[in-house]
Amino acid sequence: MMRLLAGSHTTLLIVCRRKVIITRRLFAMQGEERVSSVDKQRLRQASPGIRATLAANVRQLREEEGLSQEELATRAGLHRTYVGSVERAERNVTLSTLEAFASVFGVDVSFLLQERSTDV
């Protein structure tokens, strides 16, 4: 292992059998605000409210269409257990998954993320 100092950051080279296999730039901690990996993970997760809204909308639309979770999963190109976990607000879905659900139900993606009144 070899370290090269250059300015305000450090470059770390890991050498194996005379070949550089990993190069990683490590920035100096001086004056920089660092975000911990736990904080980064929180930033990437959708809020529980958005997941709950999506879950309720997917379940309501699925039931209105008379589809089982398995039928919805097949039409959307997803696994049936994944649909169940979305409906329980356990999943942080991707945009492509939102598009798949929207396509099956014939609605816009934005419709799936809108809170709707339950006083119908």
Image (cartoon, grey):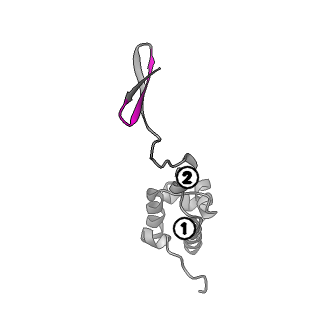
**Which image quadrant: the C terminus?**
bottom right
Closer to the camera in the image, 44 or 96: 44
What amino acid does circle 1 point to?
Ile
- Tell me the CA gap for discs 2 and 1: 19 Å
**Which residue occupies 57% across, 82% down?**
117
| Identity of the residue drawn at 59% across and 55% down | 82
* Three-letter code for the amino acid on which mark 2 is drawn: Asp
The residue that appears at 42% across and 70% down in the rendered structure is: 108
- Report the front residue among 68 and 53: 53
Reading the chain from its start, which is encountered first: label 2 or label 1? 2
Q: Position of residue 86 (x, y in %)?
A: 58, 60
Task: Find disc 1 in the rendering and name its residue.
Answer: 50
Which residues, given as a range, are shown in magenta? 6-16
Mark seen at residue 39: 2
Above or below, comparing residue 53 to residue 72 in the picture: below
Name above or below for residue 102 compared with residue 38: below
